Amino acid sequence: MDACFYFQLHQPRRVRRYQVFDIGSGAEYFDAAKNADTLRRVAERCYLPATRLLTELARTDGARVAMSISGVLVEQMERATPDTLKSLQALVAGGGAELLSETSHHSLASLRNADEFADQVRLHRHMMKRVFGVVPRVFRNTELIVSDGLTPVVKALGFDAMLVEGADTVLGWRSPNHVYASRSAPSLRLLPRNYRLSDDVAFRFSARDWSEWPLTADKYASWIAANPGDVVNVFMDYETLGEHQHEGSGILDFLRALPGALRRAGVRMVTPSELATRKPVGLLSYPGPMSWADTERDVSAWLGNGLQHAAHERLYSLRDVVLGTGDLELIGTWRALSTSDHFYYMSTKWHADGDVHTYFSPYATPYEAYISYMNVLRDMEQRVAGLKTRLKTEGRRPETKAPARSSRKPKAAKAKAAKAMAAKRKK
Amino acid sequence: MFGWEYPPYAAGGLATATLALANGLVRRGHAVTMVVPFPAAAGEGGVRVVSASDVSANLRVLRVASPLSPYAASSLPPAPWGRRTRPTAYRDTLFEDVSDFAVAARRIAAEHPHDIIHVHDWMTYAAGHEAREVSGRPLVAHIHATEHDRSGAWTHPGILARERDGLRDADRVIANSHVTKRHIVDEYGVAADNVDVVHWGIEPPDDGDLHLPSPFGAGVPIVAFVGRLAMQKGPDYFIEAAAKVVARHPTVCFVVGGAGDMLPMLFDRCIALGIAHRVYFTGGLTRVETERLYRIASVVVMPSVSEPFGLVALESLRAGTPVIISRTSGVAEAIANLVTVEFWDVNDIADKILAVVNDPVLARELRERTNEEMHDLRLGPDEPARLTVESYELATTGP
């Protein structure tokens, strides 16, 4: 039996409480201080200790995991916690983690705009190349969102495999513990998450009323070994390690003991790109969009009510004019507003899953999240209109080309130049 | 059950809540004897009403007020007990009435068989204590509003002491929100294990024609305030926010529904802010008038400084109108689909009023979600009675 561990790393740029009175005032959209504080806290509790531990386990036990790091997080780490970024670079360089691809801004573009989706995938690819020196071969979409319409697009963007939710409704009688292929893109491998074994760690690890508490690494490894099939895919948020499951729960000790326990149980740690070379046992079809979130496993956590739809529509109605300005800063801001979390905060699902939503939301209510977000979009609409008028009076035409590639090129080129300079200095 | 306010002699939410609870208990098959400190009208819905004034000729006053916020200006029917023989200070009479009520309670307890004694707010705690002396039945003290809620920083030491002693003396305590529970546990040292939280339920609206054409014409959004014009309800913050909204909206009108000692001050403030033409004061409203106001309003704002529960929010939502309420009010625990604010943050209040008034998607979403919630059993009229009976059982058997 093999086991594939994958962790998602992501922090949104949370929008601050932005009132109607802020429109036109030039006030910041994002709560820079809160975002930096949150990132530092999560870095201290999770990113740094877990990454150091994984780096050490890679060296001593040959542990290998997979990770995807959203572009919005990398940008924030570059500014607020460069040491965290360094530790992740060391982990990747040491072979302890394989990086996966995703959208640069952890967005829902795949559900709304194919061009934007492709742009954001390319942006992320460039960023991984620039920051980590690798080009990922395996894709995972925001919150594992997948549909039959999406898989051919992912294939066309050059990926071999994609991570998906191993939902009962899709698998039916079949086990998630195999490599599958997409019905609508048969050359794209699908790696379904084993949600039971994933949630045992992500949600139940510190639940004292759980009959299996406390969960030891040996017990967990024996469950994986006893599962039927070829490979158990354990996918979760990286923040599970020390943040969602706090350090006092013993989660890091669990992680430390895991590679040894897996070895003793005869379980090999594999990465998604290794699985991508295997022959699929069958085809999976996802007629409607499916994700790893909430009990419904659909996209209702982000686009489930009228507020979320209205906000998402209004954002995308601005895309052409925003890209048309050629203003790189404005385009970056618009993309940062496409991050799925903004819509998650507007969710009005109050039942069992609502608690999870409240836990993650910086707002008192979803209505507050919506009001701030819509005020921000109104300000952006006015800014764009102002830019257009200015360009017109100056007699210039706004750039019309999509600046996805070009917007990154200067930065990438700059980084290259900086590298060359550094190399020169060393000599 | 000993109550101080009970319809038709009501000054605030206490009467509404007591009536709803008594009716709920009767619907669940319990017999309720309601003891009130004024000449009793016939009981409604199977609740037997016994008047303590039949027993003690001295009992006259029924409404509670603190020195700085007497409920005096509210629109009550003329009180038949209003003849004051001794022109003493208001406060002194109040305490006298409270102890007269307690004396009467001894006789009533002996004459009316009962299994449980249930008292509502501090005015009735002494009566409950006396009744238990006579019958030996368990005493449940219900707290709807603390002295702090009524009077803010100017609390009355005598009332504080009676409230504290009454709650500590009871076999079981029912608080109408977690906010209130926390307060009595922290401030009065009431054992937390001994306190059950029972949120208020809501009865269907009174009969009568609840629909009213908007007096401002179609398409003019109306923002309403409903409640006593007293400091604790924050009507001054409502006016300040109104000024900010008027500056950004061409037609919106504000209606202040209620009476109280802050009326002249609010009036002057509207003139000073130059918004007198957009703010309308109705004075005290009857039940039906209040229901009509909820129905013509686009949004109801409740910026209470201190609000142990906040029945206005439930009533407004029942009428299908979204509410913007103070984050610390008790009702915020019970309902999820609210727009919440800090009562002092007038920019925030104004921003949210504008959002609801200008954005049909937001208004519709709020209406639909709250409508779902109002159909939830948790807020139904029978839920408080069910939880109260559970509390009775704990009072009888011990936890």
Image (cartoon, helix red, strand yellow):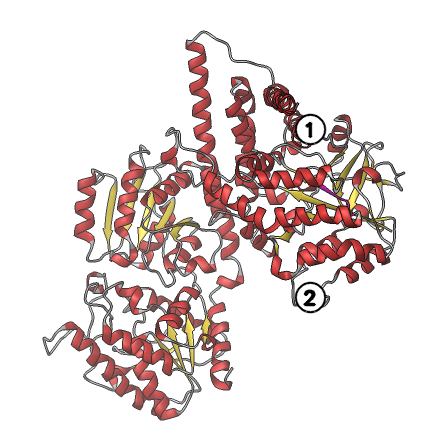
Q: Residue furthest front?
A: A427
Name the image quarter holding the N terminus of chain B.
Answer: bottom left
Q: Main secondary structure of the magenta part?
A: strand
| Image location of residue A351, percent across then percent down | 58, 56
Residue type beneath disc 1: Lys
* Residue B303 appears left or right of A123: left
* Residue A174 appears left or right of A323: right
| Image location of residue B338, percent across then percent down | 45, 51
* Residue A174 appears left or right of A117: right
Residue type beneath disc 2: Trp
Looking at the image, which residue is at 16% across and 72% down?
A: B90
Chain label for disc 2: A
Highlighted range, magenta: A63-67
Check disc 1 and report the residue beneath it. A129
| Image location of residue A284, percent across then percent down | 82, 40
Looking at the image, which residue is at 32% across and 71% down?
A: B6
- Local packing at callout 1 (Cα closer than 10 Å; few below 14, some 14-19, many 20+) is few
